[in-house]
C-alpha cells in the first residue's frame, strides 16, 4: 500500500470530485423541483436579468460568435464599472463579542438561568 489511509482517502476524494465535475460538464442538467433555500439563486437570476436588459434586449446577432462577443463585452463592462466589492462595517472584535453573548444567552436559556 502506498501512503497512509488519510492520503489515500484524500486522493480518492480528489478523483471523485474530478469525475463529478467532468460528468456535470458532459451531461445536460435536469432540474427536478426548486431547491429548499434559493437566496443565491435569486442573485444569479437578477444578474442574468441585467445581462439580458443591458446587452441582449433588442439585439440582432447574425451568429453565435456575435452573441458570445456581446455577452463577454457586457461581463467585462460589468466587472470594470459596476461590480462593487463587499465591505465589512464591523470589526472582528465586535462580531466575536456578539457571538459570545449569543452563545452565553443560549446556554443560560438551556439551563434555565434567564433573568425573567
Image: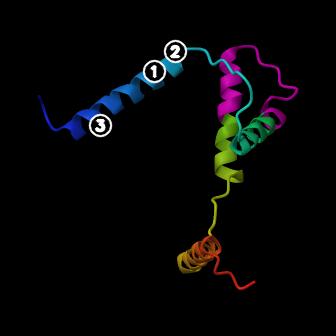
Work out whether residue 107 or residue 111 is closer to the camera in this orientation and state it. Answer: 111
**Residue 64 falls in which quadrant of the image?**
top right
Q: Position of residue 39 (x, y in %)?
A: 73, 45
Classify residue 114 by image quadrant.
Answer: bottom right
Q: Name which of mark 3 and mark 2 comes first in the sequence.
A: 3
Quadrant of the drawing holding the C terminus: bottom right
State which quarter of the image contains the N terminus.
top left
| Residue 64 lies in the magenta stretch | yes
The dot on residue 84 is none
Eye-nearest disc, 3 or 2 = 3
Residue 10: assigned label: 3
Q: CA distance from mark 1 to mark 3?
A: 18 Å
Element marked by disc 1: helix
Q: Residue at x 65, y 73 (%)?
A: 109
Q: Nearer the viewer, residue 28 or 13?
A: 13
In percent of width and height, residue 94 lies at 59, 80
Kindly identify which residue carries mark 1: 22
Dots 2, 1 in contact, CB < 8 A: yes
Q: Residue at coordinates 56% horizontally, 76% vertically from top-left?
A: 100
Q: Secondary structure at mark 2?
A: helix
Marks 2/1: CA distance? 6 Å
Magenta-tinted stretch: 52-72
Amino acid at each position: 500500500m502506498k501512503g497512509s489511509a488519510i492520503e489515500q482517502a484524500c486522493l480518492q476524494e480528489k478523483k471523485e470530485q474530478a469525475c463529478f465535475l467532468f460528468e456535470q460538464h458532459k451531461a445536460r442538467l435536469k432540474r427536478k423541483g426548486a431547491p429548499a433555500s434559493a437566496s443565491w439563486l435569486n442573485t444569479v437570476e437578477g444578474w442574468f436579468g441585467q445581462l439580458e436588459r443591458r446587452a441582449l434586449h433588442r439585439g440582432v446577432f447574425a451568429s453565435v460568435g456575435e452573441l458570445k462577443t456581446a455577452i463577454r463585452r457586457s461581463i467585462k463592462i460589468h466587472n470594470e464599472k459596476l461590480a462593487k466589492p463587499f465591505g465589512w462595517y464591523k470589526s472582528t472584535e465586535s462580531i466575536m463579542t456578539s457571538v459570545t453573548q449569543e452563545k452565553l444567552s443560549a446556554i443560560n436559556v438551556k439551563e434555565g438561568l434567564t433573568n425573567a
